[in-house]
Amino acid sequence: MNVGALRNHPLSVGFEWQDHRGPFRRVTDDQARQYDELGYFLLEDVIPPDVLEQVRAVIDPIEVKAEAAIRRAGGKVSIADADAIVFSAQLVLRDAFLAEFALSTVFADLCHDLVGPDVRLWWDQCVYKKPESPKEFPWHQDNGYGFVLPETYLTCWVPLVDATVDNGCPWVLPGMHRRGTLEHHWTDTGFQCVDNPDDAVAVPARAGSVVVFSSLTPHRTGPNLTTSVRKAYILQYAPAHAQLVDTGDGASVSDTEAAWRLPVLVGGLPCAAR
């Protein structure tokens, strides 16, 4: 990949990645080093099967309603496609168990280790990729979908079923996160920052694991070539002072929108335990 051909977002000026130092609550020194150097790591088998089953049981009917709404709207809404990929966001507002899950110890620990002492939930959404769909989700950074300051926050990609290369697991571009936010362009399947890189790495993950990566790590998911739905729940966490920058297109964080973002850590202490 010709890194020199890539351009940074106009607002990404003077960005410097800050490496992480322990003591850590959850991640190992090697995982922290991989996160700093490559922008991702896989945290395996940390969600108990009974908890995962309940998460699926809550989200599945929400996704069914979301798909039905997309079909009523003609089958496609923005980048959602009833026959290919369905999104549904802000699920913590719809179910108390999902709010509890978003604040649970594994995510609070990751926030402590990789974000800071004062953290809130920034975004959550389910993404269900339909079977035998050739559609791929393009290479993007999460910070390309709305420029957030500080630029780096945490994405936890939770497979609700085993995520494989065949059904659309995440792929990442190691090391690119250290450049800051890249310039993105719009496509009919979403924002894109990189075209056909040759050094991408697949990150298959068992259900109950968490693919952990930075908001600045370019990533994509491949097509689902199997006969089953690939189900994922994505949770994103940002410093408590994070703000969405108004880039001139009307995108900004209102007080109402900010209010639903659940506090996860205050002064390093988990809010769920209070």
Image (cartoon, rainbow, N blue to C red):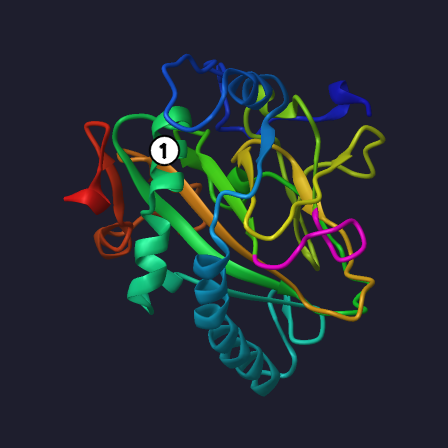
- Secondary structure under the numbered disc 1 in the rendered image: helix
Residues in magenta, as a range = 160-169
For residue 193, what is the image quadrant? top right
Task: Characterize the local packing of mark 1: few (<14), some (14-19) or many (20 or more) Cα atoms within 10 angstroms.
Answer: many
**Residue 94 in view in this figure:** yes
Tell me, yes or no, whether the highlighted magenta stretch contains residue 162: yes
Residue depicted at x 49% and y 17%: 15
Total number of numbered labels?
Answer: 1
Image position, residue 264 (x, y; %): 27, 41
Q: In this view, which residue lies farthest toward the bottom? A: 72
Look at mark 1 in the image and give the residue it sits on: 109
273 or 19: nearer the viewer: 273
Image position, residue 36 (x, y; %): 55, 18
Q: Is residue 45 left or right of residue 247?
A: right
Q: Quadrant of the C terminus?
A: top left
Residue depicted at x 52% and y 35%: 215
216 or 229: nearer the viewer: 229
Residue 82 to residue 236: above or below: below
Q: Quadrant of the N terminus?
A: top right
Identity, as a three-letter code, of the amino acid under mark 1: Asp
Q: Is residue 251 left or right of residue 83?
A: left
Image position, residue 210 (x, y; %): 54, 43
Tell me, yes or no, whether the highlighted magenta stretch contains residue 166: yes
**Residue 244 in view in this figure:** no
Residue depicted at x 83% and y 62%: 225
